[in-house]
Amino acid sequence: MARHVLPSVDSTMNEAARLAPGLSGSAWIFAHEQTAARGRRGRDWRAPAGNFSATLVMRPEGGLAQAALYSFVAALALEAALAHVAGPHARLSIKWPNDVLLNGGKIAGILLESLQGGAQLAIGIGVNLAHAPPRNELEPEAMPPVSLAGESGMVVPPEEFLPMLAQAFAHYDRQFRDYGFDAIRNAWLARAARLGEEITARTGAQTYRGTFETIDATGALILTGPEGRRAISAADIFF
Ligand SMILES: O=C(O)CCCC[C@@H]1SC[C@@H]2NC(=O)N[C@@H]21
């Protein structure tokens, strides 16, 4: 698979959009540093040298709904690659839909954007390998950020993390294509943070509190509260 390695870039998502028209297959776009990286919901994302920053551009099968499920494929791949470097005792979990947590703090984030009218998908992945952002730069209720180095003392060069992540992604992508979302859903649920516990979901103006029952066949979070069972397809989650 093609790999583009950049010393510095505004955002690997922007670079993905620039390169996409010329890409026939899949490609990883990796940068040692990003100067204007973005997170979900228009938030800024810090991506200094030492942290991992990459975007995978690919051509998903099926329509947009199918492409959105790559959020879970990517989260599983990221969790697997982190388990590989952090060792079997690291407390890793996935917060719906796709934040990877280490020891209960956010170590990584995933951002999906469609390109070329949905023909291509850009999956951006950022991992705090060396540095966590300062708490005061985040929203007050955001998950506490952590880094791999801070939690474990381990130094993993970002360029060495790329092949591990690419391999783990290829594994789960194959599972998804061969066995469908059910296989991904089961693996995801086995690693889900706060499954069966009380959580809060905030969707724009609405806040719902309830028990995190499961995710459905579309990836929506199923919350059971005083008003019954609710499927939530986009929200911020608070524990
Ligand atoms: O948790 C989030 O809000 C998602 C963060 C995604 C950050 C990655 S870093 C690589 C890629 N380039 C970007 O500008 N953003 C994503």
Image (spheres, rainbow, N blue to C red):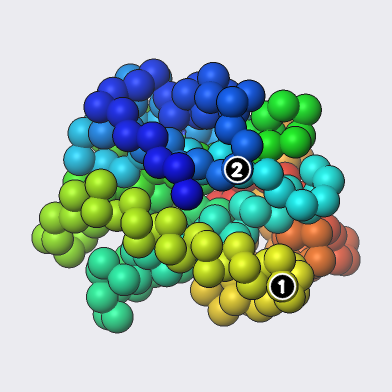
Who is closer to the viewer here, 65 or 15?
15
Farthest-out residue, right: 228
Q: Is 189 placed above or below 236 here? A: below
What's the residue at 24%, 54% (across, down)? Answer: 160
Q: Decide if ligand 1 comes within 8 Å of the CB at mark 1.
A: no
Q: Is residue 6 visible?
A: yes
Q: Position of residue 161 (x, y in %)?
A: 29, 54
Q: Are marks 2 and 1 in contact (CB under 8 Å)?
A: no
The dot on residue 104 is none
Q: Amino acid at mark 2?
A: Gly
What's the residue at 34%, 71% (across, down)? Answer: 83
Q: Residues within 10 Å of mark 2 (few under 14, many from 20)?
A: few
Q: Amino acid at mark 1?
A: Asp
Q: Is 199 placed above or below 130 here? A: below
The dot on residue 25 is 2
The dot on residue 178 is 1
